Image (cartoon, helix red, strand yellow):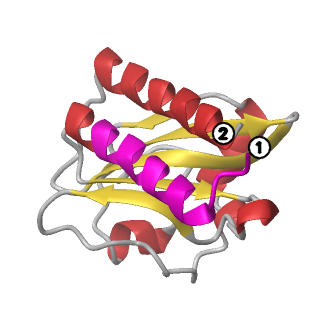
């Protein structure tokens, strides 16, 4: 039985809400290419935000796959952890820092059939921060939950 796109979005939003609570971050997002459900990597498929944080849904001005951070995840196929976006490589999209105030982030790959179909982002907008081992485990677990929901 095929799950409806609306039901899938609801399930994915719930996964990201749990991740937001576990990490106490500012925002969690899922970007995903999935033609069956009409999802495109340049828009947010699912999201959870802390109080006072703007949503990134519908903001498609950044070519996501061209971003240095996405290219790093594509090449390495593992969790990218960035404690301070003001320095270091790979550089995040300028708009993410300048317009949305993101100061630290983690990106976890979503791989299917040998392809990088997307990633979960965990954003911290209040300040740079050290992502704990527990934070990293939480985002990797969320990526596994997303894959199960998509199966």
Going from N to C along the chain, the mark reached first, 1 or 2, is: 2
Total numbered circles: 2
Pointer 2 local density, CA inside 10 Å: few below 14, some 14–19, many at least 20: many
Report x, y in % for residue 66: 72, 64
Residue shown at the point (64%, 35%) measured from the top left: 147
Pick the residue in front: 121 or 44: 44
Camera sees residue 126: yes
Pick the residue in front: 55 or 101: 55
Task: Say which residue label 2 marks.
Answer: 110
Report x, y in % for residue 69: 60, 50
The label on residue 3 is none
Residue shown at the point (23%, 53%) measured from the top left: 26
Report x, y in % for residue 89: 54, 44
Residue shown at the point (38%, 25%) measured from the top left: 138
First to last magenta residue range: 1-19
The label on residue 116 is 1
Horizontally, residue 51 falls left or right of residue 103, namely left
Q: Is residue 10 magenta?
A: yes
* Marks 1 & 2, CB-CB < 8 Å contact: yes
Pointer 1 local density, CA inside 10 Å: few below 14, some 14–19, many at least 20: some
The secondary structure type at the circle numbered 1 is strand
The secondary structure type at the circle numbered 2 is strand
């Amino acid at each position: 039985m095929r799950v409806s796109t609306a039901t899938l979005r609801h399930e994915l939003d719930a996964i990201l809400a749990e991740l937001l609570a576990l990490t106490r971050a500012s925002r969690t997002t899922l970007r995903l290419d999935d033609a069956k459900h009409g999802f495109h990597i340049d828009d947010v498929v699912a999201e959870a935000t802390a109080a006072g944080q703007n949503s990134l849904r519908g903001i498609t001005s950044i070519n996501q796959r061209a971003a240095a951070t996405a290219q790093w995840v594509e090449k390495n196929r593992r969790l990218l952890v960035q404690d301070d976006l003001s320095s270091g490589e790979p550089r995040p999209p300028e708009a993410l820092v300048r317009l949305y105030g993101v100061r630290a982030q983690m990106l976890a790959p979503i791989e299917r059939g040998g392809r990088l179909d997307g990633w979960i982002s965990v954003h911290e907008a209040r300040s740079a921060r050290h992502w704990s081992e527990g934070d990293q485990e939480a985002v990797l677990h969320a990526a596994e939950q997303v894959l199960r929901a998509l199966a």
